[in-house]
Amino acid sequence: MKKLGFIGVGNMAGAMIGGILRSGKAQPGDIIGSCRSQKGAERAREQYSIEMTTDNREVAQNASILFLSVKPQFLDGVLEEIGDVIRGDQLVVSIVAGRSIAYFKKMLGESVRIVRLMPNTPALVGAGMTAGCCSEAVSGEEMETVGDLCRTFGLFEILPENLFDAVTGVSGSSPAYVFMFMEAMADAAVLAGMPRAQAYRFVGQAVLGSAKMMLDTGKHPGELKDMVTSPAGTTIEAVRVLEEKGLRSAVMEGTGACIKKCAQMNASKD
């Protein structure tokens, strides 16, 4: 395995590193990372047994596949710092939200070999969903290499970049909406007398099982919903109230707002 470099080793990059190491596709000695603070670098070194530094340029110089996993507000500075050491034979992989391939071409040159990823936080438990797209200079074999790495912490699909704002809304940010829904259901169970820890277990397993049913069966979610709703029963009564309160509209509006914000972020940098 060629050396992998991670500029920024936070939760998401950590999930990726953990999945890659568990899969055996790379060994700790194959990975180098950087954090802004010495304390952060030491913590990542202790957790993953990888080489760590506070020098972003050192990572860029030593990596054949360079992952950029910093906050969007820090990316301009990082690219200015490492731009002159990016090599033509190097694959640059970004997991930074709201930064398009056009942005990287502007910052690093038209010939940059850039892969853009949008993972999500369930990667932390090996159940992530990652979308990928790339610049024209990236070969199909290279894209498959990145896909293989992404599959170590969940599912991976290649999509056209014009769908990446939608990916952010429906996958990248959506765990937050799901957690809100789960918390609300657990609160209702607590109101009915169930201990909170038990309520979270019941809700968590219900959501996990529901998602697995949809993915494994390939059935439309509406069909699966109908399987639960008996005539004049308890479930259809809950569905009636949720419809009355505008659940679908609220979810669509919230997801749409996320997509719009992502598009604005892209537009401001392209």
Image: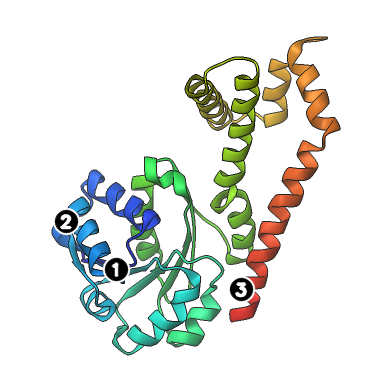
Who is closer to the viewer here, 190 or 162?
A: 190
Check disc 3: other Cα within 10 Å, few if <14, some if 14-19, many if 20+: some
Do callouts 3 and 1 mark residues in contact (Cβ within 8 Å)?
no
User: SS at mark 2?
Assistant: helix
Q: Amino acid at mark 2?
A: Pro
- Residue topped by disc 1: 35
Q: Where is residue 163 drawn, in percent x and y?
A: 63, 60
Name which residue lies at 23% across and 57% down: 43
**Residue that carries the numbered disc 3 in the rendered image:** 266
Residue under pointer 2:
28
- Determine the secondary structure under disc 1: loop
Q: List the single residue furthest toward the right.
A: 244
What residue sits 52% from the left and 65% below the top?
97
The residue located at (56%, 68%) in the rendering is 98
Q: Is residue 61 visible?
A: yes
Query: How packed is label 1: few (under 14 Cα within 10 Å), some, or many (20 or more)?
Result: many
Name the kind of residue labelled 1 in the image.
Cys
**On-image quarter of the C terminus:** bottom right
First in sequence: mark 2 or mark 1?
2
For label 3, the SS is helix
The image position of residue 141, as x and y in percent, is 35, 63
